[in-house]
Image: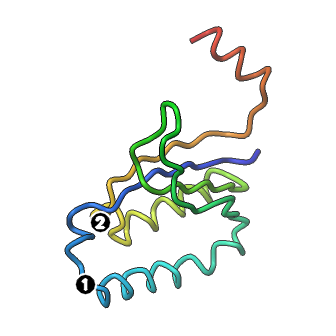
Amino acid sequence: MSQYLVELYTPNTKWKALNTEQRMRFLGAIGTAMSGLSSMGVEVLTLTEIEPGLDQGSKHRFLGIWRFPDVQARDALLTGIKASGWYGYFDHVNAAGAEGDFARHLGALEEA
């Protein structure tokens, strides 16, 4: 069953203190580390800036949505993100869950 991860993140003061070269070096390492994810069945559904002004919108600046073939692939990405030092540079929130449908979701809400 597919697994999903939603990330919301905003650069923090530590990131803003880096110069352009330091940012490029860090992001280059991230890009290199991410290159092998597709062989694990990891799909990036979107990595984008969040649209401002949305009713009940997040205050975060960026959004990432990922799909994984299983929990192990998802956890491998999360382990890599943590090991990279990403969380030190971005105020970051993760939400994850399994593939679902409307009827199942309504049932879960009813029982909540």
Identity of the residue drawn at 56% across and 48% down: 6
Q: Tell me which corner region of the image, top left, top right, bottom left or bottom right, holds residue 99.
A: top right
> In the image, 36: left or right of 104?
left
In primary-sequence order, the first of circles 2 and 1 is 1
Residue count near mark 1 (Cα–Cα under 10 Å), binned few <14, some 14–19, many ≥20: few
Residue type at mark 2? Tyr
User: Residue, x 72% and y 75% (percent of image)?
Assistant: 39
2 and 1 marks in contact (CB < 8 Å)? no
* Front-most of residues 57 and 14: 57
Q: Which quadrant, please, contains the C terminus?
A: top right
Would you place residue 42 above or below residue 94 in this image? Answer: below
x, y percentage for residue 13? 21, 63
Element class at badge 2? helix
Which disc number belongs to residue 110?
Answer: none
**What residue appears at the point 34 percent right and 81 percent down from the top-left corner?**
23
Binning the other alpha carbons within 10 Å of mark 2 as few (below 14), some (14 to 19) or many (20 upward) gives some
Q: Mark 2 points at which residue?
A: 89
Going 48% across and 31% down the picture, which residue do you hit?
A: 56
Expressed as whole percent of the image width and height from the top left, the position of residue 50 reads 51, 52
* Front-lying residue, 63 or 41: 63
Secondary structure under the numbered disc 1 in the rendered image: loop
Placement of 30 over or under 74, stated as above or below: below
| C-alpha separation, residue under disc 2 versus residue under disc 1 | 13 Å
Tag 1 residue: 19
